[in-house]
Structure formats: C-alpha cells, structure tokens
Image (tube, helix red, strand yellow):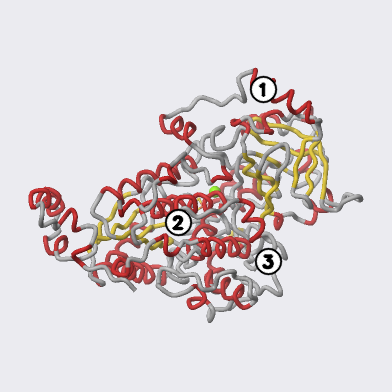
C-alpha cells in the first residue's frame, strides 16, 4: 500500500511551503489566533475537516455537535489536527419549499470548502435525508480521503402502546384525522410521540436508507449506520471514526477507491434488502456521476428488483431503529445476503481497509423477527421497477409496498393479474390537490389513478414529496385506503403507498405528464414495465404541439436566486438531479 509522507500532505502547500515563506506566514497566522499552535499546523499532522451538518436549525443532525467532540478526540489521539467546518444546513422537515432544493447547494459549498482550504481528509457528519448524499457527492468530486459518520436514528417512538415511527405515524393519523376519528390535538400527540430523542427518523425512511447505504457503499465503519443517536456506542464509533481518518490519509484511501461500480451494485442490493426509500436511486445515481461511475434506473431494476426484503422496519414492516441496531444493523443484512450468495461483490473495499465480506460475514442477524434470512424474507421482491412509456422515460415503483387490498382492487384484472387501467384525475401541484381532493364533483372512485404533476426538480424546485396522495375523505370513510398514484415528484421514504414516482422528464420539461388530461385512461403494466396514456400517437403529438404553442407547461416564479439557478441548471431525477456539467469536475484535489 502506498504511504503518504508528512511532507507530501496537501495542507503543507498552505502551512509549510518552504519555497514561499511569505504566503505560509499569511496562511498560518490567522489560524493561530484562536489558540492553535504552529506544532499542530506545521509538524506534519494531517488536518482533518469535520464537515458539521448539525445545528439548532437541523434537529435531526444536531447531536453531531456533541459527537464532533468524540471525533476530534479520535483525530488528535491518532496524530491529527481537527478543524470543524459548518456545512450549509439542511433540515428535511423545516426547509421550504423542500430540503431537496438544498442538496446541491450544500454539495457546491462543501466542494469549495474542501478544495479551497488546507484539508487533508474529511469526516462527513451525515444523517437527515439530504445531508448524506450532499456530503458524499462533495467528497466524490474533491476525492480526498473521506469517512462518513451517521448521527444515528432517534430511539423508538411509542404511542398508545405501539411503536410509533417517524413520518409513518403522520401518514396514518392524517387518514384518521380526515375521517374525523381523531382531533387535531390527538394528531399532534401522535406525531410528537414518534420523536422521543435526538437523532434522525427511526423508520426506514430516506435517512435510515441513505445512512445504511453509506455503510453498504463502504464509506462508514461497520455497524456505524444503525446505532441510535443517544447510545453509548454512538460516541465510541465517533471516536474510532476520528482515529481511522488519519490512517486513511496516510494510506491515501480515497472515495474513488471505495465507491466503485462494485460498491454501487452492492448498495442497490442492500437497498432492496432493507426496503430502502425511493429517494435512494436519485442520490446514488448523483454520487456515481460525480465519480464517473455509470449508474442508471435500469441498473436499479436489473440488480435490485428480485432481491428479497429482509428488514422488517416501518413503513413496510413493524419495527424501528433501535430494533434494527440490536438485530445487527447493516452488517447483519450484508451477512445474510452473503450467506445466500446474493451480495454481488463481497470483495468490495471499505473505509477500514477490509473487504465488506471481511467486516460482515460473522455478524449474522441476532433477531430473525427484525432482520430475516434470505430463505424466509418479509417479501420476495423488494426492489424497484423502472417504468417507461408515452407518459415518461423513467419512473420508479416500489412493488413491495403494494398491500393486499390494493392488489385485490387493482391487480386482479382477469386478463392480466399484473396490469390495470384507470381514469386519470390530474392535479397541478399539492395546492391544487388539497383544494379538490375532497370535492365530490371530481367523481373520484376506486377505478381512478391520481396524477400529480408540476412537482419535479424544476416544477417545484427540488421536487416535492407529494406523490403519495391520500384518497378523498368520502372514500376513506368507506374504508378505501389507497388509490394508485403517479407523479413527477417524490414520495417521502416514510410513506408506504404504492406510487409511481420521480417521473422524468417532468411536466415542467414538457414531458408526457404535461399533456395528460383528467378523464384520459392510463394503463399500467407491471409485466412489461410500461405506463401509457391510451390515446393515439397522432393525438399525443397534437397535444404536445399545442402545449409548446401555448408556451409550455407553466412553472411558478422562483422565490429566491438559488431557486432560479437551480432550475436553470438541474438535471432530471433519473440523472441524479445533479447540476449540469458538475460531473465534469472530478478528482479536483489533485489538480
Ligand atoms: Fe430528518 Fe427524517 S426528517 S431524518
Ligand atoms: Mg423525506
């Protein structure tokens, strides 16, 4: 293994450049002014950024303010100097119009920080949904040694004697609220009960998904993803993460050495096995593009769809984050996959220098109710299918959340058990949905398909998590829980509806959804992975010409400069929602 010599550390170009004592003095003096010593900055210790995503504004990641102290202890113990660096805040539940808008902003700003300052390696303090991809994307572009550290999930929530999971409890209670079964105060009590401690969502939402995948990609120490935020092991693994980044700097072990095509293939399989969020393909496709690894939604179907669901966590299952950790977390999931020969690349390398098989093989599930084996899974096929047709080029469906009621109503078509047709009811954004969904004159019945458009990356900048539409209250009162939904927006990872999501191109790019009309018939065929409006090609062409003639699908005005820059530059969901041409900048720390 190649070893970096202290005189070749990147930070020496700033702090100890013998050919330019003047600039060295200028770079150095201001970092001394708060008490750092020349010994810490000039004696060949790696300088490690702790990329801090926690703040009062970001409650999911706020515990990182505490964990950073343990990371710092580990860095110093292993012979480094720690510099804590603020990352643009992203709080999933607090940012309007959507936290997804800020993923690329946090990415851009962290790239500039890591590139432009004297930093030899970085600890990525990940957690809440978009913080994980933003930081992994930035580390991929800059490509200095990097290790991720989850903040960990909240403790299990409990309400009325049952496990109450983040988000999931709200999706369920909103139906009871709409049906008049609970009051607004009771609704709030249920929501608060699901958030009992520091940490991120305790369900298998986007946060648990992305933190698990950061480990499956090899970017976290084994077991680091699932430890609940308040547990003692969380502080301990923070210390070990700080120690390990120093070794990684000396070994020159970089993101591009770890996040290879093999690592992404493993992550896709793990995503299915954990029942991961439909936001994962957007984020992993984005990270891969910054590394120059080819990855698209066809890969997600080919590698992931037939993988069984092993982890029994809400929303698809019963348990929550603490149970996931106690049953063995990500190493146990990977051990079960390896035991069944289902992990494609057991030899893939991880941040601790060992292969993923080496890290995980001996860590089988300790509770088969929570993490199951491949021969007795929760469900057989847990991955996504990539749907195409005249409405869009790519849209994802998580087939494992199709419930028995839904399957009976929609998929028991006598001529084909995996296809259904319905009448489209089209909504232009969430406001339009809330205005009209309960209006009886819309005539929504159980043979309708609800369509949400104007909610993609450009339409609702960042893309809204609104495609999981509830049924009208008059149907909820009759016991109808689910209607099929299609949209160019996203769905919260904590919601379990059978929706067709992330449709690209979006309506705002004048994709097929833009010309759909309420009353059109749509055919969804899960055998051929197609979704089509049942109109002639000539009629489709006529409508598209008309749309362009009328100035295209209307997009609301941007409310901030970043919204406009984002809209001007953003790529569709299936391309990772990256900024145009950003992936041309690779491995920039060496340039
Ligand atoms: Fe932050 Fe779910 S809202 S992790
Ligand atoms: Mg979310």
Q: Is residue 54 visible?
A: no
> Does ligand 1 reach within 8 Å of label 2's beta carbon?
yes
Which mark's residue is nearer the viewer, 2 or 1? 1
In the picture, measured across the screen, residue 326 lies left or right of residue 124, that is right
Give the number of callouts.
3
In the picture, measured across the screen, residue 537 lies left or right of residue 21, that is right
**Label 2: few (<14), some (14–19) or many (≥20) C-alpha neighbours in 10 Å:** many
Q: Quadrant of residue 244?
A: bottom left
Which mark's residue is nearer the viewer, 1 or 3? 1
Q: Earlier in the sequence, mark 1 or mark 3?
A: 3
In the picture, measured across the screen, residue 49 lies left or right of residue 568, that is left
**Label 3: few (<14), some (14–19) or many (≥20) C-alpha neighbours in 10 Å:** many
Residue at left 31%, top 49%? 86
Image coordinates for residue 372, horizontal then vertical, percent: 65, 73
- Which residue is the site of mark 2? 127
Residue 308's label in the rendered image is 3
Q: Earlier in the sequence, mark 2 or mark 1?
A: 2
Q: Secondary structure at mark 2?
A: loop
Residue at left 8%, top 52%? 21
Q: Earlier in the sequence, mark 3 or mark 2?
A: 2
Image coordinates for residue 68, horizontal then vertical, percent: 32, 61
- Which residue is the site of mark 1? 547
Q: Nearer the viewer, residue 531 or 56?
A: 531
Cα distance between the residues tagged 2 and 1: 42 Å
Image coordinates for residue 411, horizontal then vertical, percent: 83, 51
Measured along the vertical axis of the image, is residue 460 above or below residue 163?
above
* For the residues bearing labels 2 and 1, Cβ distance under 8 angstroms: no
């Amino acid at each position: 293994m190649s070893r970096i010599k202290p005189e070749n550390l990147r930070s020496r170009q700033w702090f100890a450049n013998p050919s330019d004592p003047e600039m060295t003095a200028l770079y150095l003096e201001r970092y001394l002014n708060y008490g750092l010593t020349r010994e810490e900055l000039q004696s060949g210790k790696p300088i490690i950024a702790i990329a801090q995503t926690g703040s009062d504004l970001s409650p999911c990641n706020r515990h990182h303010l505490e964990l950073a102290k343990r990371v710092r202890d580990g860095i110093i113990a292993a012979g480094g100097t720690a510099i804590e660096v603020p990352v643009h805040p992203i709080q999933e539940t607090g940012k309007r119009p959507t936290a997804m808008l800020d993923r690329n902003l946090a990415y851009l700003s962290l790239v500039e920080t890591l590139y432009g300052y004297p930093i030899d390696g970085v600890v990525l303090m990940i957690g809440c949904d978009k913080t994980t991809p933003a930081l992994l994307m930035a580390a991929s572009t800059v490509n200095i040694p990097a290790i991720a550290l989850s903040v960990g999930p909240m403790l299990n929530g409990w309400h009325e004697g049952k496990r109450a999971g983040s988000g999931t409890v709200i999706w369920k209670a909103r139906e009871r609220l709409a049906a008049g079964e609970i009051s607004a105060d009771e609704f709030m009590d249920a929501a608060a009960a699901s958030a009992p401690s520091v940490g991120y969502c305790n369900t298998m939402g986007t946060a648990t998904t992305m933190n698990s995948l950061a480990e499956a990609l090899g970017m976290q120490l084994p077991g680091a993803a699932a430890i609940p935020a308040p547990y003692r092991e969380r502080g301990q693994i923070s210390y070990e993460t700080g120690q390990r980044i120093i070794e990684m700097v000396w070994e020159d072990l970089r993101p591009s050495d770890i996040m290879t095509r093999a690592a992404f293939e493993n992550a896709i399989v793990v995503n299915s096995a954990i029942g991961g969020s439909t936001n994962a393909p957007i984020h992993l496709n984005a990270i891969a593009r910054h590394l120059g690894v080819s990855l698209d939604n066809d890969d997600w179907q080919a590698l992931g769809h037939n993988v069984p669901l092993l982890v029994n966590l809400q929303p698809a299952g019963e348990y929550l984050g603490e149970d996931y950790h106690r049953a063995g977390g990500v190493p146990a999931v990977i051990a079960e996959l390896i035991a069944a020969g289902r992990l494609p690349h057991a030899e893939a390398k991880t941040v601790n220098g060992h292969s993923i098989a080496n890290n995980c093989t001996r860590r089988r599930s300790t509770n088969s109710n929570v993490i199951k084996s491949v021969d007795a899974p929760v469900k057989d096929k847990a991955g996504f299918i990539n749907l195409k047709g005249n409405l869009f080029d790519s849209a994802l469906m998580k087939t494992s959340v199709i419930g028995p009621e839904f399957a009976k109503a929609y998929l028991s078509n006598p001529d084909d058990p995996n296809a259904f047709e319905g009448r489209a009811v089209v909504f232009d954004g969430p406001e339009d949905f809330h205005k009209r969904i309960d209006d009886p004159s819309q005539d929504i019945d159980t043979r309708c398909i609800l369509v949400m458009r104007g909610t993609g990356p450009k339409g609702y900048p960042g893309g809204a998590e609104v495609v999981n539409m509830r049924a009208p209250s008059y149907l909820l009162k009759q016991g109808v829980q689910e209607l099929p939904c299609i949209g160019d927006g996203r769905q919260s990872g904590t919601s379990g509806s059978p929706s067709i999501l992330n449709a690209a191109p979006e309506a705002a790019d004048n994709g097929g959804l833009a010309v759909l009309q309420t009353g059109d018939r749509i055919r969804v065929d899960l055998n051929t992975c197609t979704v089509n409006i049942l109109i002639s090609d000539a009629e489709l062409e006529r409508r598209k010409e008309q749309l362009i003639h009328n100035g295209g699908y209307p997009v609301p005005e941007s409310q901030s400069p970043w919204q406009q820059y984002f809209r001007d530059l953003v790529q569709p969901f299936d391309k990772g929602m990256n900024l145009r041409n950003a992936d041309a900048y690779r491995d920039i720390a060496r340039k």
